[in-house]
Amino acid sequence: MTRDGEISLDGDQEEMWVEVIGRIDEVYSDLLRYETDLEQKNAALEDAYAALDRAHRDLQQAQRTLVEQEKMASIGRLVAGVAHELNNPISFVYGNIHALDRYRRSLEAYLAEVHAGGAPDDLARLRRDLKIDPLLADLGPLIEGTLEGAVRISDIVRNLRRLSFGNPGERRPIDLEAVIRTAAQWAQRAKNSRAALTIDASTRARAKGDEGQIHQVVVNLVDNALDAVAGVSRPAVAVSLTAEGDDVLITVADNGPGIAPAITDKIFEPFFTTKPVGQGTGLGLWISYAIAAEHGGSLAHVARPGGGACLVLRLPADRAAPRATDGA
């Protein structure tokens, strides 16, 4: 160090410090470059995250749309089944009313002649011509048949009201036997299927839950079973209700080609379907699986001796209901 306080460096020291300062400049430049790169990467990452978030929201919206489409498809199947169910009693009532109207006109004509003081022979002949005696004999059965048709229509409407009204998600005791009979029969009529449908309820056990949702699950299962047996020479679908411990089981089995072991684990995945394009969304079993889980139960495929598919909906039995045993 000099007398003025300056640092005096020899040649080697000066060269060393120049090199150190140069390295520091390089490191600083590298840091600036890394900082710029990091900012660019952070910006790119933020853009990617925003794009991913948008894609996720779009996917959720698409999923909601598809779920709603599947629900609408289920409603469509329900409406088709109800239409077929209502067709017979309405046709019966309609035909009976037309017959009653003809009888009314015949009775009016006969009574008009009676009140006009017609001769006994003329009245007797008119009575035969108008078939008054067979008409009177047929009035009772006609009225009884019309009332029977009206009662049947009322029952169908009551079933619809039971399925359609009430708070979504409300848990109430469910008459499972009534549900499987209504759902299975409506599903078959909606498809106008020729399959032999058997329904066996060997228990009076009930479950607690949303009756409309359980009805939807059974319709989905029977609908799939009917599709599966469409190409079978003697198609058959069996729906059963049994009790097992603290659970109640709804089983839907068919004699179709069955489910290949390779895809057994995939049938409950969303969008998975073996149906031709345009004949299924691949959401029916997924939604049914979710409904089963929401009710504290499960939906599973089990091996069926002799082939065909067999799906079992397992639900906790309603403990508040009277205990029921198989064969009751």
Image (cartoon, rainbow, N blue to C red):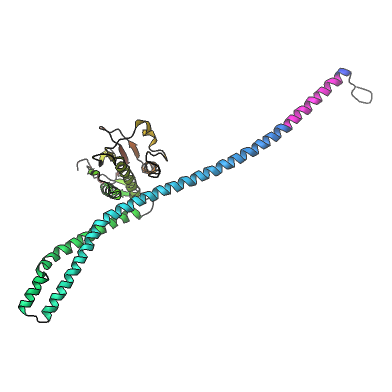
The tally of labels here is 0
The percent coordinates of residue 228 (x first, y second) are 31, 40
Q: Can residue 174 be seen in this view?
A: no
Q: Which residue corresponds to the image point at 15% horizontal and 75% vertical from the top-left?
A: 109
Q: Is residue 156 visible?
A: yes
Which residue ends up furthest to the bottom in the rendered image?
117
Quadrant including the N terminus: top right
* In this picture, residue 4 sits left or right of residue 322: right
Task: Please determine whether, in this image, residue 282 is positioned above or below residue 27.
Answer: below
Task: Please determine whether, in this image, residue 57 is positioned above or below residue 13.
Answer: below
Q: Which residue corresponds to the image point at 34% horizontal and 50% vertical from the top-left?
A: 77
Q: Which residue corresponds to the image point at 33% horizontal and 49% vertical from the top-left?
A: 211
The percent coordinates of residue 129 (x first, y second) are 10, 71
Q: What stretch is highlighted in magenta?
A: 13-31
Which residue ends up furthest to the right in the rendered image?
3
- Magenta: main secondary structure: helix
The percent coordinates of residue 142 (x first, y second) are 16, 63
Q: Which of 84 and 252 is in front in this view?
A: 84
Quadrant including the C terminus: top left
The percent coordinates of residue 91 (x first, y second) are 24, 59
Q: Which residue corresponds to the image point at 73% horizontal and 29% vertical from the top-left?
A: 30
Q: Nearer the viewer, residue 42 or 237?
A: 237
Where on the picture, by quarter, is residue 94?
bottom left
Tell me, yes or no, whether the highlighted magenta stretch contains residue 17.
yes
Task: Please determine whether, in this image, residue 176 is positioned above or below residue 130.
Answer: above
